[in-house]
């Protein structure tokens, strides 16, 4: 039976205002190689590959009627898109290689106005004991004088501040949306030992009920190299040294 596959690739973009965004350095290169590799064999039992990425992410350099491109923007946009696909289509495999941003902008404020709110709170207090960290934290969490981020914020604000908030963990929602899907997740650390990377990736796999994790080390990526190990609940399945090797290994594992 032909399989339906989702590949997520590249970064997410989290809006600060109508122009500025928070993003990361992911290019979507690995996701594109994964899609290219799966599509190279025209006889492979694939119905549709849903390729989810931001507009500027790298796309597979192969033409095929089997691939459907869907542009996403933010983390929440990615979650909403996945939910929509899972509700309408039986997905067999999801390769979640997207480098989802850890933080999104909560609000933007001028430092002078935030300071003014804090000073007013201090003046309201009858004693120093009334000025608690909880009261000050409430101001930081929900100040009254935030900037309107639905429009472009002025380029001439000398003391502009952005409060960040955590984004939802996409990998943790996938099996809840589609319990029977085969989930391939990814974990990237930088300059750690193989043992530490394995430990962290294993915890990620267990926590999110993933079938496989591709564990990467940023210090071993570049100049045509991309070392990674692929692991499942039994341990390390294989190790790879290039993006193409990762793609071929996953192809063999999943088909």
Image (cartoon, grey):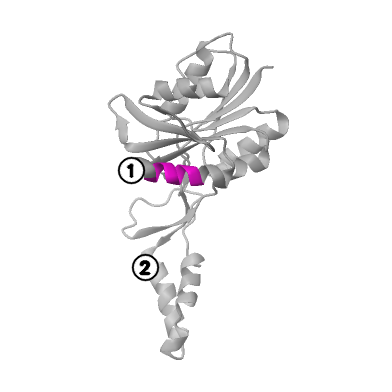
Q: Position of residue 208 (x, y in %)?
A: 57, 44
Query: Which residue is at a point 48% across and 14% down the rendered structure image?
Result: 62
Label 1 Cα crowd, 10 Å radius (few <14 / some 14-19 / many 20+): few
Extreme residue toward the top, this view: 43
> Which label number is shown at residue 177?
none
Q: Position of residue 234 (x, y in %)?
A: 52, 36
Q: Is residue 78 visible?
A: yes
Extreme residue toward the left, this view: 223
Seen in the picture, residue 116 relative to 40 is either above or below; the reply is below
- In magenta segment, residue 201: yes
Query: Which residue is at a point 47% across and 45% down the rendered structure image?
Result: 14
Query: Which residue is at a point 71% across and 34% down the rendered structure image?
Result: 87
Q: Disc 1 designates what residue? A: 193
Extreme residue toward the bottom, this view: 126
Quadrant of the image containing the C terminus: top right
Query: Which residue is at a point 64% across and 32% down the rendered structure image?
Result: 181
Dominant SS of magenta comes to: helix
Range of residues picked out in magenta: 196-203
Seen in the picture, residue 175 relative to 48 is either above or below; the reply is below
Q: Quadrant of residue 116?
A: bottom left
Secondary structure type for disc 1: loop
Q: Disc 2 designates what residue? A: 112
Q: Select label 2 or label 1 by which is in front.
A: 1
Q: Is residue 176 left or right of residue 142?
A: right
Q: Is residue 191 left or right of residue 8?
A: left
Label 2 Cα crowd, 10 Å radius (few <14 / some 14-19 / many 20+): few
Quadrant of the image containing the N terminus: top right
In terms of depth relative to the viewer, which is nearer, 52 or 236? Answer: 236
């Amino acid at each position: 039976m032909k399989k339906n596959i989702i590949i997520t690739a590249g970064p997410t973009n989290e809006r600060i205002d109508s122009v500025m965004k928070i993003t990361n350095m992911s290019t979507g290169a690995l996701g594109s190689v994964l899609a290219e590799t799966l599509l190279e064999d025209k006889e492979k039992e694939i119905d549709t590959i849903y390729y989810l990425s931001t507009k500027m992410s790298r796309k597979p350099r192969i033409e095929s009627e089997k691939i459907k491109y869907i542009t996403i923007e933010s983390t929440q946009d990615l979650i909403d898109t996945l939910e929509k696909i899972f509700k309408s289509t039986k997905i067999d495999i999801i390769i979640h290689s997207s480098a989802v941003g850890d933080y999104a902008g909560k609000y933007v404020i001028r430092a002078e106005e935030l300071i003014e709110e804090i000073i007013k709170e201090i003046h309201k207090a009858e004693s120093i004991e009334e000025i608690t960290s909880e009261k000050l934290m409430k101001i930081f969490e929900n100040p009254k004088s935030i900037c309107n981020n639905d429009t472009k914020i002025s380029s001439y604000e000398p003391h502009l501040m952005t409060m960040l908030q955590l984004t939802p963990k996409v990998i943790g929602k996938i099996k809840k949306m589609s319990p029977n899907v085969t989930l391939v997740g990814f974990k990237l650390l930088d300059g750690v030992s193989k043992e530490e990377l394995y430990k962290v990736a294993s915890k990620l796999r267990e926590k999110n009920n993933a079938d496989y994790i591709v564990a990467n080390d940023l210090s071993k990526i570049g100049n045509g190299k991309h070392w990674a190990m692929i692991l499942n609940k039994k341990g390390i399945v294989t190790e790879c040294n290039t993006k193409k090797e990762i793609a071929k290994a996953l192809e063999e594992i999943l088909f």
